[in-house]
Amino acid sequence: MAYISDGKIKEPGMQHLKMQYNEKDNYFYLGNYFPKRKSSADAFSNLIIQYKKGNNFAVKYFENIIVNIIFNYFWFCDLIVPVPTSSSMLDVYTNKIICLSLNALNIIKYEDDILKRTRGYVPSHITNRRNTADIANSIKVVNGERIKNKKIILFDDIITTGHTSGAIRNILISKGADSVIMLFIGRTVN
């Protein structure tokens, strides 16, 4: 597990983080995520797992990185919207914590009631089938007037297939968003 020493992150094997761009699917991410069940899981992947569990250190670590990225690269965006969780069973929704922090720091505006999950959804990387209609039917834009002509950052912790985030991007555009930039902490590598 990562720790702080002399004000710096110390972690054996931690990859140097820099924002990366996937041109094919049009999204930005910080690093590769190897699922826990894979033998090649690394320190970065373990930190993401801790983040998903609500570990305070991991949340603050990624919060600091995301604050700097948005401040330096996406300063022109109007609104950040987290991808709604696919399960309502989560006690801690760390993506929302980061969005609240960005809003409190006046880095970018966050409104809690833009996207709502209308029903549970099993992601396609688990079911091994892509059904864009299922995704679109499980997400609802609430208060659509708040996204009209806005440049939006769609934020999530991990991108695996991109089906969910791509469908949500299309929904936001169809409801009047000017543009949608997708930003993820990790990209799943199988």
Image: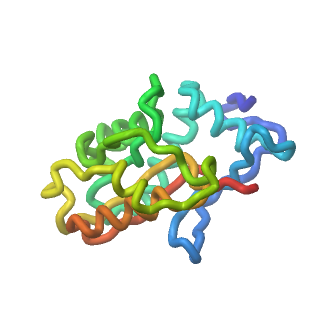
Q: Residue furthest right?
A: 39
Q: Is residue 36 visible?
A: yes
Q: Quadrant of residue 45?
A: top right
Quarter of the picture holding the C terminus: bottom right
Counting from the top left corner in percent of width and height, residue 144 is at: 17, 56
Q: Position of residue 183 (x, y in %)?
A: 48, 57
Q: Nearer the viewer, residue 71 or 20?
A: 20
**In this rendering, does residue 30 appear at all?**
no
> Where residue 9 appears, x then y in whole percent?
69, 37
Please indicate whether residue 95 sits to the left or right of residue 9 in the image. left
* Residue 175 in the figure: left or right of residue 31: left
Q: Is residue 37 left or right of residue 117?
A: right
Residue beneath the point at 30% across and 43% down: 116
Instruction: State which quarter of the image contains the N terminus.
Output: top right
Q: Nearer the viewer, residue 8 or 160?
A: 160
- Name which residue lies at 16% across and 50% down: 143
Q: Image point 34% across, 42% down: which residue?
A: 117
- For residue 130, above or below residue 105: below
In-front residue for pair 166/45:
166
